[in-house]
Image (cartoon, helix red, strand yellow):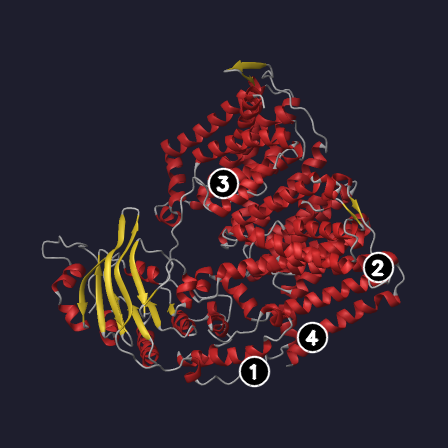
Amino acid sequence: MNPSIIGQMAVSGALMGLVYALIAYGFQLTYATSKSINFGQGELVMVSAFFSLTLTNLGLPYWLMVPGGLLFGALMGLAIERAGIRLALEQKSEGWILLSIIMGLFLFSAAENIWGRDDRPFPTPISADPIRVLGVDITRLELSVAVGVFAIMGLIELFKRRTLLGKAFEAVSADRDAAELMGISATRTVMLSYALSGAVAALAGILVSPITTVGPTMASALILKAFSVAVVAGLDSGFGVVLIGMALGALESLASFYLGSGWREAPGLSLLILALAVRPTGVFGKAVIRKV
Amino acid sequence: MRRILLLRGAELIVFAFLATVPLLVVNPYALGLLTLLAIYGILLIGLDVTVGYLGQVNLGHVAFLGLGAYAAGLVVTRFGLGMVPALLAATVVGLLLGALLALPALRLEGPQFALATLSFAALSTTALNELESLTGGAQGLSLVRPPVFGHALTPSLFYWLCMVLLALVWMVMRNLLSSQWGRAFEALRDSPIATDAMGVGTYYHKVAAFSLGSGLGGLAGGLYAFNFQYLQPQSFVYELMIILLLGVVLGGRKSLWGAFVGATVVVLLPNLLSNRLLFHIFSGAGFAVALAAGLRGLAKKSTRPFQALAPVVAMGLLAIGGFFVENTEDWRKGIFALMLFSVVVGLPEGLMGFLAIFLAKLFRVPPSPLPEPSDLDSVLPPRAQGDGPLLVLADLKRHFGGVKAVDGLSMQVRAGTIHGLIGPNGSGKSTVVNVISGLYTATSGGMSLRGSELPQGSLNRVARAGVARTFQNLQLFSELTALENVMVALKGVYKMPLPLVLLGFARLEERRAQADALALLDLIGLKDQARAKAKDLTYGAQRFLEIARALARRPDLLILDEPAAGLAHPDVLQQIEIIRRVHARGVTIILIEHHMDVVSELCDQVTVLDGGKVIAEGAPDEVKRHPKVIEAYLGTASGSGPSGGVEPLPA
């Protein structure tokens, strides 16, 4: 029960939690415009990481590889929207849940066959040497995660508030029908949200890969926790996912320390089911008034 | 009658054939596949309850298979008990854990529900892996099939056991789903709010359905354990869940036959992947079917281009890719994905849904005739129009944040009257109705019905207290027929306890329910369209049907929320006539309406709201001349009325 060990575990856990928060933020982007989320987002994270690894292996420098990976993620997001989401939304059915799971399954299979089933290291120019901050060791790699997460979330939030296109995004989120009547194409806005969400997922993959390694199953645990964070925080609070993400990361890092690494996932999952029981709209979500 | 004979006949033939297989075939491999077919059949019937009837994507069913399997395995290995207690334990574990998960998870809808079940599945895999002292962890758990009543179970005997259980599950589920329970499941998928408002507890039925489906998952798990005699947590993971969903969707939702067909597909899939020639044949056939159906859909313009072409592309990828891939086993997930994608997009009703339409055309068997309508006096007994107040609202308030939608409303509705509630848009009429009927909880104030406190904040409990309502924005059960819409809401007809329903005794009540519902349809003039789906009725007929459905509750107080909204003139006249007939039977009515002529014609007393407060009360003619009412509707000469500029008062 050394307090400095607890502090160390909590801090590195919380930094890892930022990755969950980033993926969860990707869910919020699409949920805002279309009330749908991509259940295959984990596979999107994984294939984008593999693609970025290929770019690196081709000799692209880091600063070129990152935009390349983000672009790939955005394109994949668009493909999923077109093939898996749009039809179901037009039919006002919940078929998109199943369809996005299916597309994820296909991406998984494709990745297994294209890049192989083994976990591979992800080279990065950022050093893994620890620096000491307030008595806790943090690596530059972990710091790069925090910087990347806050940078892209900040950029997207700025985009939503300051640009015309971003305001269209907000308008469709607030009231789809009214936005359509004002001449904003809801379909295009939903596409935009899926492209952004895909880019966000790709960045999550690029940030986390140097720490975890790249492999077909790299995101299967990650995505469950991102789901937990998104639902516990509520699907409409960007601030909420960061807070809940960091808390969950710290909690599970402590759980795996005290209960054994097999129980790593348990706190997040129990928290999810509990939170749903107590507050179905999420801790930071708005309660919806039912209308008839 | 012929229809039932045909259906039962088909079931009988299939089961008789399956039962004789071990006598004819000695191939142990084929027998093993058929045993699995029975087990997966039970599993998929359970999954269909949530995916088909409740219409929710359930990603946790595979966990109940695993938990049931381990429960059965542990009962045998740890406690040394026999097969019967083991299977019972597996079922009970499924039922209980299903209820435990359903209680929180079913307060959610759609994606959140799917996530909750997914988390549960992941959590149960973790538990099975980590509780090593109990489950053996990743090492797995070996067990031996115990004898039953002193007889060792040969593969044939075990096969028969599985088949008998499948047949039992089949019968029990058919009985349940064709009873009021099945109707309630379908109703709450179409409109959970209306299901509650008709006194059929939505939440209760959902939890019961989920728990039941999970119990079947547990039972299948028990059989699974005795079939393989070796268990591993890794067997019950996401990939199997996807295959199970593929089975239900491909077979056809909301259908026992669909689950059976789906189970066949699930059992045959591994063979399809290991045999190259078989794979080419099936993928080629799938491509041809998708192409034919797609082109036909495009030519007849009956499907959207995407819906017609996407399955063709997916199946084409499968058929052509099959020639380039070295080992199909490597691509198994991708192959499942392509198949499932084609089915979900191109054949959303599944194979059985498609076949059912085809067979219905082929045989054209008329449905069994409906009974004669009951006497209306027994369905909706005329009651004495007692004097005195029926409903009393005292200083009722409902605020939304800073908006005071209802702000200190006091009002009395006398028994046996039609009480009008009018006011300009945004005056709080709908909020009042929603507070009385239990959709909203009052911020403060009291409500009493015939002197006793009215429950607050629960549509279901208010409905059971004797208040029925209709909805301004129609909340019919659109996939059910007009008759079934009324039957769902019938009060005091369904008395059979669940065990007897499962055994099929609910049929005795069904005739009575049909007759009663027909009497109410007759009252609103829709008797001839009893079998039409609610969504296919004309708009006017849908509004009338809302009233018939509410009357099935035998209410003391009926709240009509803008029953004439959007109706054409002839329909308005018919609606007035219907309301008169209902009132003549002694039902007290609160009428919210914008048509002033309807209000003048029908109401004994009118309350006018504005800004959440009562501004006038009295007979219709007095109220119309009241200066405050004129001001609220038309604004004052200076235009500074409290809600100036709202719609004019229709004469």
Instruction: Identify the element where label 1 is drawn.
Output: loop
Q: Nearer the viewer, residue B95 or A203?
A: B95
Measuring from the top left, give residue A58's x and y in whole percent: 65, 22
* Labels 4, 3: front one: 3
Query: What is the three-letter code of the residue carrying label 3?
Result: Val
Question: Mark 2 — residue?
Answer: B147
Circle 3 packing at 10 Å, graded few (<14), some (14-19), many (20+), is many
Q: Can the viewer see residue A261 in this picture?
A: yes
Chain letter for the residue marked with disc 1 in the picture: B
Q: Which residue is drawn at 59% across and 68% down?
A: B498
Question: Mark 1 — residue?
Answer: B369
* Labels 3, 1: front one: 3
Q: Which of A47 and B459 is in front in this view?
A: B459
Labels 2 and 1 within one chain: yes
Q: As drawn, is B214 to the left or to the right of B391?
A: right
Q: Residue at x 31, y 72 (%)?
A: B589
Measuring from the top left, give residue B127's x and y in whole percent: 66, 42
- Choose the circle earlier in sequence order: 2 or 1: 2
Query: What is the three-letter code of the residue carrying label 4?
Result: Arg
Query: What is the three-letter code of the residue carrying label 2?
Result: Pro
Query: What is the three-letter code of the residue carrying label 1?
Result: Pro
Chain letter for the residue marked with disc 3 in the picture: A
Q: Nearer the viewer, residue A35 or A73?
A: A35
Distance (Cα) linking label 4 and label 2: 33 Å
Q: Which residue is drawn at 66% across and 47% down?
A: B337
